[in-house]
Image: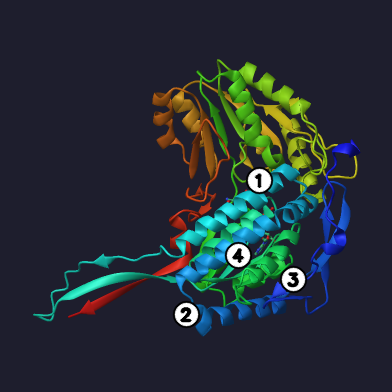
Amino acid sequence: MNQSVQNPQPELSAIRQKMFIDGRFVDARSGKTLPVFNPATGAEIARVPDAQAEDVDAAVRSARATFESAAWQGMLPVERERLLLKLADLIEQHGEELARLETLNNGKLLMFSRMLEVGANAQWTRYMAGWATKIEGSTLDVSIPFPPGVRYTAMTRREPVGVVGAIVPWNFPLLMAMWKIAPALACGCTVVLKPAEETPLTALRLAELVMEAGFPAGAVNVVTGYGESAGAALVRHPGVNKIAFTGSTEVGKIIGRSCMDDMKRVSLELGGKSPVIVLDDCDPAVAVAGAAGAIFFNHGQVCTAGSRLLVHKSRYDQVLAGLASAAEATKLGDGFDETAQMGPMVSATHRDRVVRYIESGKAEGAELLAGGQAQPGSGYFVRPTVFSNTTGKDLTISREEIFGPVVVAMPFDDLDDVARKANDSRYGLGASIWTNNLTQAYRLIPKVQAGTVWLNCHNMVDPNLPFGGYKDSGVGREHGRAMIDVYTETKSVCVAY
Ligand code: NAD
């Protein structure tokens, strides 16, 4: 690797290695820790507490005490707005430190850590700050006829749902954390966040910045630990009013069932197998760039990754050849290397999982056009991989979410055929359509079962754009006005006069 283009890595001694409960960094009561790795090298970079139920209990008690405190209950919306705006400023002020920490821990290219984990993060925080002062109910006419002579009027109030247990994955660690924390705080909730065990480091630093912004101790707690122990304890805890979860569909279903047992509020942002649809008029060069970005961005570790490529038969060979060359030309490397175009998978376990899927594609008869293996060496790299399935075989790699840089392509005949193929999935998170033919685009958009449909772009998100899934991709919508539904309860008030 060319050292001259290496950006400096963060000082390991500056990494926070304790979890954040009630405004203080603490160890797990058991003293147990879990290792955190640099996925580009496989080196251990930190150990963080392996939280158990007793630690989660302390965090939830803190969040609840803060939520119920007179100071929190009496805080004006404009004050929450001011604190969130201050937090956004702090995220930007410490942006370079946070971005480097994220690249070290997650492996993503530093450019994307800067743009998304920091830049978009601050944007989301400011957007949600604005909502704190704009939460509203309605006044309602009602028709209650008795007792005679009495009149009624009614209104609704939005009240914070309470203590939010936020559980997030490792693919956008800091951004996913803020996608829960900012709306929860804007709505007047307090939070216990459990980051993914692979990527806890930026969340721990963020917790400190939340305090520095002026939020009281307990407003945001961060417990580090494994899903089956710390995560499950948070889901089951009676002091938690709502679980906001982003992660796999399998875990989402377990959490959803548990929340229903306890009548906890729950929102679930889950997996995907999103189609990229290239219509017959699309310039093949545009299609190649669009399809490559859709699947290879963030090394394919994106819930909306365009992992199924559907190309009109008249363009199929040309687009697939272009995509295969783009994949072969991709330079893999450490996220700190400015010449690298793709970083590693987040963990050795995940790399091995992605490679197993690639092997299943080969074994089940898909045609391999590019990539097809892990890159030898100490980091967790997988070559960008392109499969073609012209025979329409039912392949595991077409059905299951791989969450890596692996795309399976198929040709289609017409709009009905592509709608059927696009919807032939248990998932329904995202989809993109590539065309300049607006008639075809507008006919296809209503047929595609997905929470977001992009036209001539893919993976684009915005705090003002509701985000969530159809089918097995989840329940509820994050962002925009829709977030108020998931972080507040509606109270109806009926007044006789
Ligand atoms: P995962 O479901 O394995 O883990 C996600 C989080 O849940 C982690 O913090 C984990 O520790 C925790 N967890 C695991 N088991 C748990 C349990 N039994 N109880 C409580 N918590 C538990 O997912 P992952 O591998 O970390 O992330 C990848 C998945 O996330 C993919 O399926 C991806 O599509 C999905 N994702 C979805 C979105 C979205 O917005 N829809 C965004 C990003 C990622």
Spatial CA span between label 2 and label 4: 24 Å
Marks 1 and 4, Cα distance to the nearest angstrom? 23 Å
Image quadrant where residue 212 sits = bottom right
The foreground one among 424 and 96 is: 96
The answer to whether 138 appears left or right of 119 in the picture is: left
Quick one: label 2, few (<14), some, or many (20+) residues within 10 Å? Answer: few
Residue ID for mark 3: 19
Quick one: 77 or 142, which is closer to the camera? 77
Q: Residues within 10 Å of mark 1 (few under 14, many from 20)?
A: some
User: Could you tell which of marks 1 and 3 lies nearer the N-terminus?
Assistant: 3
Q: Which mark is residue 74?
A: 2
Residue 497, horizontal then vertical, whole percent: 17, 80
Residue at 54%, 50% (x, y): give it: 472
Which label's residue is closer to the chain start, 2 or 4? 2
Q: Is residue 246 above or below residue 141?
A: above
Q: Tell me, for residue 115, which label it has, or none.
A: 1
Within 10 Å of the Cα at label 4, are there few (<14), some (14-19), or many (20+) other Cα atoms?
many
Find residue 58 and name its label.
Answer: none
250 above or below 451? below
Does 138 appear above or below 460? below
Q: Separation of disc 1 and disc 3 at Cα?
A: 26 Å
The answer to which of marks 2 and 1 sits earlier in the sequence is 2
Q: Secondary structure at mark 3?
A: strand
Task: Of the two numbered discs 2 and 3 on the same chain, state the one appearing first in sequence.
Answer: 3
